[in-house]
Image: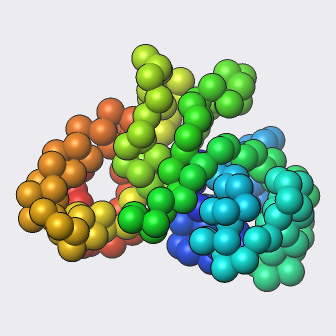
Amino acid sequence: VITTASLPWKTGTAVNPTLRAAYLLRLTPAAKVTLMVPWVEAVDQEKVMGSHKYKNQKQQERDIRQWLRNDAGMADVANKLKIMFYKGRYHPDYGSIFPVEDLLALIPSEEADVAVLEEPEHLNWFHPETPEYWRGRFNHVVGIIHTNYLAYTQSYVGGYYKKYILYLLNRWMVPAHCDKVIKLSGVLQRY
């Protein structure tokens, strides 16, 4: 399960994927489930979390596991879930964290079976120069659409025109990376 946000930032793209990964581990015969989340440095942590929180990834991983145990009531899987970090940067213009490294290069080939991309359009807008796509690496890829980026884009200067460019980009990008797309709301873009 690869996402664009991480606890303790309590946004839907942090909470939902964490729960999804934990439930996949609990309810399926999967021997291993990985939650892949962004790691942002201190300057970005302050923007996202209100204050600097973590000196290293192990501290943040500890808090994710503690949240699963205490808040989500999933102590049975809190320590079994594999948590992997990728380098991300927060962009205030978008209010979002974007990957700044090749995510596919971080995932061992032997673990590339089923991928759940939380916000596949967002994860791939700044795709690194690599010929590899998610669908080429994994046996099956599910994209979960959370955010109405078209509505956000329309609010920017020139947004009326940018909205259509983004619409076309997303229409191409999401099916290129995903076998199945699930929208969490009816107002989200169609793919």
Percent x, y of residue 164: 12, 54
Percent x, y of residue 26: 77, 59
| Residue depicted at x 53% and y 24% | 137
| Residue depicted at x 33% and y 43% | 174
Percent x, y of residue 4: 55, 56
Percent x, y of residue 22: 73, 61
In the displayed structure, 169 sits above or below 134; it is below
In the displayed structure, 74 sits above or below 25; it is below
Quarter of the view holding residue 113: top right
| Residue depicted at x 82% and y 64% | 54
Residue 111 in sight from this viewpoint? yes
* 90 relative position to 166: left or right: right
* 17 relative position to 131: left or right: right
* 137 relative position to 34: left or right: left
- Judge by depth and name the residue closer to the eye, 27 or 49: 49
- Count of all numbered marks drawn on residues in the image: 0
